[in-house]
Image: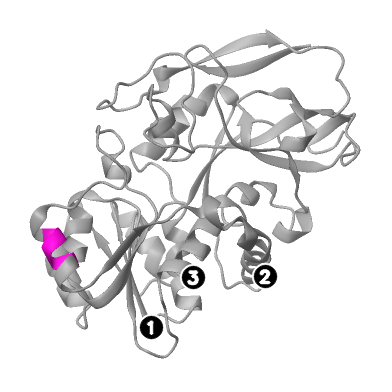
Amino acid sequence: MIVQRVVLNSRPGKNGNPVAENFRVEEVNLPDHINEGQVQVRTLYLSVDPYMRCKMNEDSGSDYLAPWQLSQVVDGGGIGIIEESKHTNFTKGEFVTSFYWPWQTKAILDGNSLEKVDPQLVNGHISYFLGAIGMPGLTSLIGIQEKGHITPGSNQTMVVSGAAGACGSLAGQIGHLMGCSRVVGICGTHEKCLLLTSELGFDAAINYKKENVAEQLRKLCPAGVDVYFDNVGGDISNTVISQMNKNSHIILCGQISQYNKDVPYPPPLPPDVEAIQKERNITRERFMVLNYKDKFESGILQLSQWFKEGKLKIKETMTNGLENMGAAFQSMMTGGNIGKQIVCISEETSL
């Protein structure tokens, strides 16, 4: 059987911006039979995420991310339906997901690498398992639980950067749900700012491309900042940190402004900002959601419950077609998405 797949065509270079042309689509033959323990899946949805920028380098700079290899199939978060199974845990028609799903229209996978998902948890919106009811949701929820130190009723102010992205758009809502009295988002367009305040319950939003962030923060966070959910790093984060209170907390989710630069993770703060951080005893610890696997199951149930109760609004940007994976990735890296960027490979869920 002939299937399509996406391979890494070229590397952008450690300090380069990724482009769609770094990926290419090719056809490949899938074996006609599967072995014991394997399943054949049809891919429904694939995820593109900022962390993937690190996998485009020869050295990902991280011990838990294996770099993608040139001319080899690319992988990431994916979800699909089982067409044939020779694994005792899986039967035809079940929905499964993996963090290492190949960018292919169909694939033969080791059943042990897959996890079943229950469509009822997402009211049938299968793609949500790659976003709010999946890794980005868990990252936001567990990050806030473990590193945010929110105490309901204590009038805490949370600031979220990259606030209209996959994690940011959830983090602000979760901040409110967990007891923050004020949540302010920072993002890059007027449309995103409007969405945050009109639909996602943020108390205010700052457009960093048009407004003076320091000035706006002073106005919108008169009592200072207690919790900062950081998705971007760089200048924006330096500005936020300089307005954080004593004994406040930074949730280090991502540093997208630094991913096209050859710097360590997390990137060091400039000396003046580091001095403020030390002086005010602001925590800024590396946060790795994969270290909290024991909290995944309860986290998914909590996120699903909030979604079903209408307390967690879910946004996604959907692109169609495997051939558009590279374009979707390039767009996501430059802020073209609102909420989670997903690529739909096949919508056909019947067999």
Task: Name the quadrant containing residue 171.
Answer: bottom left
**What residue sits 42% from the left and 56% below the top?**
287
Q: Is-magenta flag for residue 88?
A: no
Mark 2, residues whose alpha carbon is within 10 Å: few (<14), some, or many (≥20)? Answer: some
What residue is pinned by disc 2? 305
Position of the N terminus by quadrant: top right
> 171 above or below 2?
below
Question: Label 1 is placed on what type of residue?
Answer: Ser
What residue is pinned by disc 3? 145
Residue 218 image position (x, y, % from top left):
15, 74
As helix, strand or loop, the secondary structure at mark 3 comes to: helix
As helix, strand or loop, the secondary structure at mark 1 comes to: loop
What residue is pinned by disc 1? 181
Q: Which residues are magenta?
A: 273-277
Mark 1, residues whose alpha carbon is within 10 Å: few (<14), some, or many (≥20)? Answer: some
Residue 49 image position (x, y, % from top left):
47, 40
Position of the C terminus by quadrant: top right
Q: Position of 212 compared to 232: left or right?
A: left
Rounded to the nearest whole Å, what is the CA distance between mark 2 and mark 1? Answer: 22 Å
**What residue sits 41% from the left and 37% below the top?**
62
